[in-house]
Amino acid sequence: MATTAVAGIEILRRGANRREGLPLADVNVPGLADYRDMIFGGWDLNGSDLATAATGHRVLNEAQMASTGEALSAIRPWPAVGSGAFCRGVDGANKREAPGHRAAVQAIADDLRRFRESSGADNVVMINLASTERTPVAEETLGSLEAFEQALDRDDPSIGPAMLYAYAAIESGVAYGNFTPSLAADAPALIDFARQRGVPVAGKDGKTGQTMMKTVLAPALRARALHVDGWFSTNILGNRDGEALRDPDSLRSKLDTKGQVLDSILGYHVEDHLVDIRYYRPRGDDKEAWDNIDISGFLGQRMQIKVNFLCKDSVLAAPLVLEIARVLDLAEQRGEGGVQEQLSVFFKAPMVGNGHPPEHAFHVQERMLMDWLGAPQ
């Protein structure tokens, strides 16, 4: 996703006018950063430059690789904080071995400071695009900022890399977005921390393909009083995201976010709502999602809807990452810290600021964002 996003901006810089897939491309709001003004840096356990990574991912076509190769090869990831305990099977040689949580946070903060200084950026936003981590069970540790600070001091094993990065961003005054299902800034302690520091945060788990379609279709079924008797969703994908989800604990984190949307939109519990994700290596980044929807209509007559979405995972996700970064930057300019609910349209499990249930219906989420932007609809 990161490589595709960087390549996309480079192609725009070279004069391309095609802006398909960028939801806010036609929104003209004061302060919203121009795509061509975005610059990039980041961490990865794989130390290969982005051109090498793009060759391996096989998302870009030959012409796109040729036009962006020089710019991509100039970007090499910084050593990353990782944890095999939180994300089994995902490791690499470009790993920062910090002697504890506080040291890891300081190292991340130092990288942010250096990037700000060396790049000349007006502002910095951090977006989490790392592999999905298992969800820790540590309510007391994560329930308050004081408890979280104490857990950092004792190197509590319930705190994973995603939370360390989120904490470092908030402490550094850097807006933070979580595009993964991993527990990060949505921990109650870090929501409180972001509110206290006035730092914008948003998440979690980017809504790109199957779940996006679900949040479009479900409101229509409700509006037509068509009862959903069951909804079976399955996915196959063969990229690094799919490989990470072979770990049952990481998969559980993903399924938790994908499974939350339906009941809240329909207003009743769908007992037979099943979600399945399978790693299938030959498919690569070309994800395929199937949905079978059993519905009941007038006079109890049974019907079915079949949806087969063949999509390119990173091509759907990368432009959303860019838009999230732009809106978080604008929120900071406007002096709005804490949870940014107006970004809900981009996430499967939207963060909320005051404990109320999140909004999942796509059309309502879109209106929330446009109203906040002050853009005509």
Image (cartoon, helix red, strand yellow):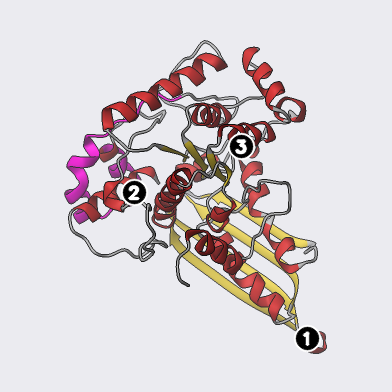
Is residue 160 shown left or right of residue 327?
A: right
Marks 2 and 1, how far apart in space? 46 Å
State the SS at label 3: helix
Query: In the rendering, which numbered label is found on residue 195?
Result: 3
> In the rendered view, does 61 fall on the left or right side of 83?
left
Label 2 vs 1, first from the N-terminus: 2
Gap between marks 3 and 2 measured at Cα: 32 Å
- Residue occupying image coordinates x 24% and y 49%: 10
Kindly report which numbered mark, 3 or 1, lies closer to the viewer in this rendering. 3
- Image x and y of residue 342, in percent: 56, 55
Query: Which residue is under mark 2?
Result: 4
Q: Residue at x 70, y 62 (%)?
A: 262
Query: Given the image, on which type of amino acid does mark 3 rest?
Result: Arg
Considering the numbered disc 1 on the image, is that residue within a helix, a strand or a loop?
loop
Q: CA–CA distance between discs 3 and 1?
A: 50 Å
Mark carried by residue 286: none
Identified at 58% across, 35% down, the residue is 194
Between circles 3 and 2, the one closer to the viewer is 3
Q: Is 54 in the magenta?
A: yes
Q: Is residue 328 above or below residue 25?
A: above
Residue 34: image x %, image y %?
A: 31, 53
Q: Which mark is residue 301?
A: 1
Could you say which is closer to the camera, residue 50 or residue 108? 108
- The region drawn magenta spans 52-80
Q: Which residue is more in the foreground, 29 or 355?
A: 29
> Amino acid under label 1?
Gln
Position of residue 108 relative to residue 354, above or below, is above
Count neighbours of disc 1 (C-alpha within 10 A) and say few if under 14, some if 14 to 19, many if 20 or more: few
